[in-house]
Amino acid sequence: MDLNYKGIQYDTYEKLYLGIVKEFNAKKIDIDEFRKLLDEVKKMMEKENYLKLIKWWEDFDTKLKTHKDVPTLDIFGKDYQKYVIPALLRNGAIPKKDIKDGHFYYGEWRRGQFGKFNKQLNYFEMWRHKFGDWRLDRANHFEDDDDMALFTPIKEITEEQFNNRKL
């Protein structure tokens, strides 16, 4: 869909969307045309946002030194493998092939920052603080997306650092 609607050139899909809403509110278009136009604009906005997300991951250039440097993992299907994983790896995330059984790691997971890799079970054993207690949970490596919270390891740590949950 073009950003020109009824002779008015809009510079964003959001403004075009608002222009169509204004037309509808002024009763210049009926409900069927309104819905059709909004569906078209929403599809274009989604496509545009998706392209922005891809560009963001392509341009991501922040060395991963602390868990706060790890961006929120926007899981977006097959392109997760194509854009997110390479961006994390080139900025210092530890690849799955370099993870060692029984070793301890610091990184980012939505509920904590410290994990121990269990090769037999193929996941990280993660400690998290919940209801005043420390509890054991699990998380996949970010290269093994399972639509759950993923762990992005950025540094191997000692068992003492893991047990104290401090660096």
Image (cartoon, rainbow, N blue to C red):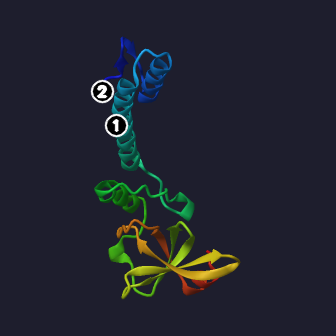
**Any mark on residue 94, and which?**
none
Three-letter code for the amino acid on which mark 1 is drawn: Lys
Residue 43, x across and y down, in percent: 34, 37
Q: In the picture, residue 16 is in which quadrant?
A: top left
- Whether the residues at callouts 2 and 1 have beta carbons within 8 Å, the answer is yes
Q: Quadrant of the N terminus?
A: top left
Quadrant where the C terminus sits is bottom right
Q: Residue at x 37, y 69 (%)?
A: 146
Identity of the residue drawn at 35% across and 18% down: 4
Q: Residue at x 47, y 54 (%)?
A: 62
Task: Give me the residue at 37% from left, 40% from top.
Answer: 46
Label 1 SS: helix
- Give the residue type at disc 2: Met
Label 2 CA crowd tier, 10 Å (few <14, some 14–19, many 20+):
few
Mark 2 vs 1, N-terminal side: 2
Q: Which residue is the site of mark 1? A: 43
User: Is residue 116 depicted above or below 40 in this figure?
Assistant: below
Task: Identify the residue under disc 2.
Answer: 1
How crowded pointer 1 is (Cα within 10 Å; few <14, some 14-19, many 20+) is rated as few
In the picture as drawn, the residue positioned furthest to the right comes out as 132
Tell me the distance, in whole angstroms, between the alpha carbons under discs 2 and 1.
Answer: 9 Å
Q: Does residue 115 appear left or right of residue 59 in this picture?
A: right
Image location of residue 118, percent across then percent down: 42, 85
Q: Quadrant of residue 9?
A: top left
Instruction: Where is residue 85? Give x, y as percent.
Output: 35, 60
Number of numbered markers = 2
Q: Nearer the viewer, residue 91 or 13?
A: 13
